[in-house]
Image (cartoon, rainbow, N blue to C red):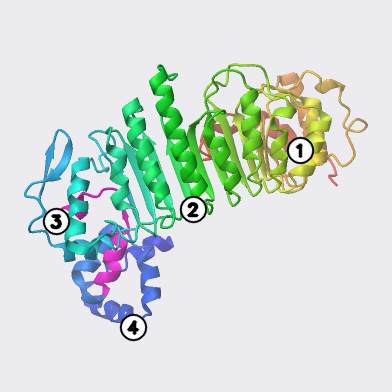
């Protein structure tokens, strides 16, 4: 039985053994009991909270730790009624039991909030006035304090023009992970959002984030000059927030304009480890190169995902465009598979291999690369490289003799996944292609094709698949040849 299932069923035993089990639990150190409950599901925790006073606190801590909604918490203060603007209090907070509220609010570590109707049925669709009333109650009854004093992770989906103000009463010194998605980007919404980010910046002595996500789904180009100005103000507000968060380790920005004031914020993020950005390219692409140079100031980066929403537009990138990123020598995962086409030659690949000696996954998913560059990657990158994404042009494959035309040291000693995108290997090319791969790879490598192995958020996709025909010939090559 899986450990989680085993521990989840511990409270569902025969009634005659319940007291003995409870007695055993009560003799354990509190830290160990808390660890055991971390594996229990919510129904199990609810049963434990109702059945044993000694286990009640551990069970409640786990039940309220990660909340998909704030409704259960607000129902502790007053009855709620649903209106066109979302949930609100029925009777006000004159008779609210604040002691009970705080006893549960202090257990919450993560929460998701939505400020409108629609969306996930598990989300909390709240009227912003609800937060205003609750915040006023905390000031009059308990002094200034965040509504969720121990909150470490906040995910917020904003639809209401004033919605971003909702996050402010929830934020306290314990918050480490903040994710905000703004679904309406009118000039007024951008103005309110700018004020919210400015307020967060003013809390820099209180706020110490480890990760930040700001996502603004784009429905089209910014149509008017007032909208452009409002967007610029919003970008400056986000940039100032970033400058105040010098301990930030993970950042996602969508969209990101190459000429945005946000570029100036990167120099302050010396501890940044992970960055995901989606560019919107408006005008000439020289600003993209300048933007990549700004990102290169984050020399501690280990994971970098760069994409653009206009992948089909513009001329291919050159090595000069991405060369500043060679300063990020700790990179272990680099994905520009959603960016423009990239032109490389042998010397470019050699330079990349020298700079990125820690690279484990490299995805260059653009136009087809000449097959002759594949041995250059094998000779230039270290044994740490496990995954390589290169759509290949097999036109010159017949001219490559694995015995005489491979560069010295052309061997992928650690590679386990070679992803060749939509490259189609003709039937009469299968054996030749497998022979070339077998000459530069070690046994165990598999060739994949189809969809990119990672999406724009850095999550593995299910669309990639093993290229069965190629792998059959590759396995045959390894079986029949003595591989050094």
Picture quadrant of residue 283: top right
**Which quadrant of the rendered structure holds the N terminus?**
bottom left
Name the element at disc 2.
loop
Q: Is residue 423 magenta?
A: no
Q: CA distance from mark 3 to mark 4?
A: 35 Å
Does the rendering let one see residue 144?
yes
User: Which residue range is magenta in the image?
Assistant: 55-75
Q: CA distance from mark 1 to mark 4?
A: 58 Å
Earlier in the chain: of badge 3 and badge 4, it is 4
Q: Residues within 10 Å of mark 2 (few under 14, many from 20)?
A: many
Seen in the picture, residue 317 relative to 37 is either above or below; the reply is: above
The x and y percentages for residue 419 are 65, 33
Mark 3–mark 1 CB contact (< 8 Å): no
Residue pointed to by mark 4: 27
Picture quadrant of residue 263: top right
Does the rendering let one see residue 467?
no
The x and y percentages for residue 433 are 77, 27
Residue found at x 35% / y 67%: 37
Which tag is nearer the camera, tag 3 or tag 1? 3
Residue found at x 28% / y 38%: 163
Earlier in the chain: of badge 2 and badge 3, it is 3
Q: CA distance from mark 2 to mark 4?
A: 37 Å
Earlier in the chain: of badge 3 and badge 1, it is 3
Seen in the picture, residue 418 relative to 111 is either above or below; the reply is: above
Residue pointed to by mark 2: 210
Earlier in the chain: of badge 1 and badge 2, it is 2
Residue pointed to by mark 1: 352
Name the element at disc 3.
loop
């Amino acid at each position: 039985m899986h450990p989680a299932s085993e521990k989840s069923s511990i409270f569902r035993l025969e009634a005659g053994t319940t007291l003995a089990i409870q007695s055993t639990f009560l003799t354990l150190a509190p830290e160990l009991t808390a660890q055991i409950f971390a594996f229990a599901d919510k129904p199990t925790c609810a049963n434990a909270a109702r059945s044993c006073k000694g286990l009640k606190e551990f069970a409640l801590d786990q039940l309220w730790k990660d909340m998909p909604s704030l409704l259960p918490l607000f129902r502790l203060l007053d009855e709620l009624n649903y209106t066109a603007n979302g949930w609100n209090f029925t009777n006000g907070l004159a008779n609210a039991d604040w002691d009970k509220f705080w006893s549960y609010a202090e257990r919450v570590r993560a929460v998701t909030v939505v400020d409108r109707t629609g969306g996930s049925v598990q989300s909390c669709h709240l009227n912003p006035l609800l937060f205003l009333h609750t915040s006023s109650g905390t000031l009059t009854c308990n002094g200034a304090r965040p509504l969720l004093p121990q909150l470490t992770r906040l995910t917020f989906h904003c639809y209401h023009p004033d919605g971003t103000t909702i996050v402010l009463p929830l934020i306290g010194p314990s918050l480490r992970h903040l994710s905000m998605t703004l679904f309406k980007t009118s000039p007024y919404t951008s103005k309110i959002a700018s004020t919210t980010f400015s307020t967060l910046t003013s809390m820099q002595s209180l706020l110490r984030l480890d990760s930040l996500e700001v996502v603004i789904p784009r429905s089209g180009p910014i149509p008017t000059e007032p909208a452009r100005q409002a967007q610029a103000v919003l970008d400056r507000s986000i940039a100032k927030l970033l400058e105040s968060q010098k301990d930030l380790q993970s950042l996602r920005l969508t969209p990101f304009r190459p000429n945005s004031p946000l570029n100036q914020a990167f120099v302050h993020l010396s501890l940044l480890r992970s960055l995901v950005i989606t560019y919107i390219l408006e005008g000439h692409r020289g600003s993209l190169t300048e933007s990549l140079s700004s990102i290169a100031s984050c020399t501690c980066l280990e994971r970098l995902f760069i994409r653009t929403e206009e992948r089909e537009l513009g001329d291919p990138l050159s090595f000069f465009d991405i060369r500043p990123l060679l300063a990020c020598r700790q990179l272990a995962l680099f994905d520009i598979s959603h960016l423009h086409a990239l032109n490389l030659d042998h010397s470019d690949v050699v330079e990349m291999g020298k700079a990125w000696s820690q690279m484990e996954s490299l995805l260059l998913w653009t136009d087809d690369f000449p097959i002759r560059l594949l041995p250059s990657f094998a000779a230039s990158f270290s044994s740490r490289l496990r995954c390589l994404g290169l759509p290949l042009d097999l036109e010159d494959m017949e001219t490559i003799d694995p015995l005489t035309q491979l560069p010295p040291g052309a061997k992928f000693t650690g590679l386990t996944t070679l992803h060749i995108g939509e490259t189609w290997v003709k039937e009469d090319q299968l054996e030749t292609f497998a022979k070339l791969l077998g000459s530069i790879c070690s046994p165990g490598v598999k060739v994949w094709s189809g969809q990119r192995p990672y999406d724009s958020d850095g999550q593995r996709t299910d669309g990639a698949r093993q290229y069965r025909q190629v792998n059959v010939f590759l396995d045959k090559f390894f079986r029949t040849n003595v591989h050094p």
